[in-house]
Image: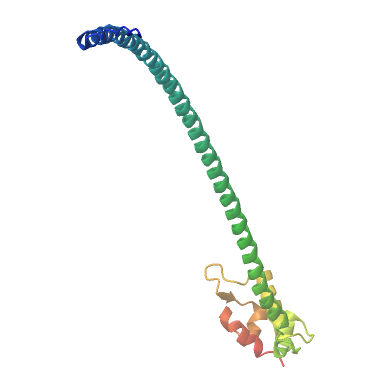
Amino acid sequence: MAKKKPVAKKKPVAKKKAAAKKKAAAKKPAAKKAAAKKATAKKKAAPKKAAAKKKAAPKKAAAKKKAAPKKAAAKKKAAPKKAAAKKKAAPKKATAKKKAAPKKAAAKKKAAPKKAAAKKKPAAKKKAKRKPNPAFMRPLQPDAALGAIVGSKPLPRTQITKKVWAYIKKNGLQDQKNRRMINADDKLRAVVGGAKKVSMFDLTKHVSEHVE
């Protein structure tokens, strides 16, 4: 007859559950410890990061402050240079205008005399073209009374008048107080009709009576 195998005794379910709970309970403290380690590590790292940020912040601020005055100084330097360039350009323009103004004025002055000269030249030409009246240039024969003063040769009327006045001035016949009056001497009295005094305005009329 065959032998019967021994039947394994089944562990009770309650014991299995209790063992599982123990294992789980053992794992939880380990997980808590790991979480606590991570938390402490984070706490330690956080102040370091904050300190690093604090250290970096003043450096950045200092760099910005240093850069700011440099930029301001550069702007200030650039501003006077621009102002100086503008000032230099302004006097150059002013001097150029001033130089141009006298040149224009000189050109106008030169042009003005040229125009005036051009205007005067035709006038001079007109005077040159003008001929004396032939009646004044025609020789006239003085009579004996007038010939005693101007000579016996025929002369133009203008020359006779000049010689009469030369005779008056030579002999001092012009009145000292009234320069318009002529004090006639014996020769001149024969020309002026025997008058002792004669006006210079009437003298030409008296002379005309003694020429042919």
User: Is residue 113 depicted above or below 15 in this figure?
Assistant: below
The residue most toward the front is 1
- Furthest toward the left, the residue is 14
Q: Residue at x 72, y 89 (%)?
A: 134
Q: Is residue 127 left or right of residue 80?
A: right
Give the vertical position of 114 relative to 204 (above or below): above
In the drawing, does residue 176 fall left or right of residue 147?
A: left
In the rendered image, is residue 196 in sight? no
Residue shown at 20%/10% (left/top)? Answer: 14
| Outermost residue, bottom side | 212
- x, y (%) of residue 112? 62, 66
Q: How many labels does the image show?
A: 0
Residue 188 placement: quadrant? bottom right
Compared with 47, 71 (above or below) is: below
Q: Which of the 4 quarters of the picture holds residue 65?
A: top left
Quarter of the rendering containing residue 156: bottom right
Task: Name the residue nearer the viewer: 60 or 167.
Answer: 60
